[in-house]
Image: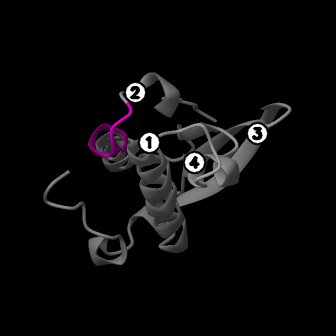
Amino acid sequence: MTSTEISAVSLPSTRRCVLREFWAWLARANSGEQFEYHRGHLIWDRSSASDLVEHERQAVAEVADTALQAAEAGFVHLVQRRNGPFDFSYLATKASCRASAAPAAALPQLPAAV
């Protein structure tokens, strides 16, 4: 299995950049390649109790929601890897060619402002 991991942690903390990176990866990835769309503790980092500022929480939520929609459409499989206490890698693994041949309409459209 080929693994290409792109860390969302290393990307600028803006909703546009992280989401654009996910969409770009999804468009070019081969079956089995992976994208790390979040590193941390997703449920915590999405909540207002986290140390993240509002725009960072929104970015985390938006890319996680998009990854979930891509999984529901059959484009990716979502998994998580435990790195340590409250430290997880959230990974999208590109699905097989059969699943990725699903109609583009099944995936949510990238917002024009992104």
Q: Position of residue 46 (x, y in %)?
A: 58, 53
Q: Amino acid at mark 2?
A: Leu
**Count of numbered tags:** 4
Q: Earlier in the sequence, mark 1 or mark 2?
A: 2
The kind of residue tagged 1 is Glu
Could you tell me how far apart the alpha carbons at marks 1 and 3 are, in whole angstroms?
22 Å
> Residue flagged by tag 3: what amino acid is it?
Arg
Q: Amino acid at mark 4?
A: Thr
Q: Is residue 10 magenta?
A: no
For the residues carrying marks 2 and 4, which lies nearer the camera in this image? 2
Q: Residue furthest right?
A: 85
Mark 3: secondary structure: strand
Q: Nearer the viewer, residue 30 or 81?
A: 81
Q: CA distance from mark 3 to mark 4?
A: 12 Å
Residue 14 is inside the magenta segment: yes
Q: Which mark is on residue 25?
A: none
- Residue topped by disc 3: 81
Rendered position, 33 above or below 94? above
Estimate the x, y position of residue 26 in percent, counting from the top left.
38, 49
Please name the residue shown 68% across and 54% down the image.
43
Q: Depth check: 87 or 67 in front?
A: 87
Q: Earlier in the sequence, mark 1 or mark 3?
A: 1
Q: Which dot, 3 or 2, sits closer to the camera? A: 2
Label 1 residue SS: helix
**Of callouts 3 and 2, the N-terminal one:** 2
Query: Which residue is the site of mark 4?
Result: 93
Reading the image, the residue beneath label 2 is: 11
Question: Which of the 4 image quadrants contains residue 17?
Answer: top left
Give the mark nearer the N terminus: 3 vs 4.
3
Residue at mark 1? 56
Callouts 3 and 4 close, C-beta under 8 Å? no
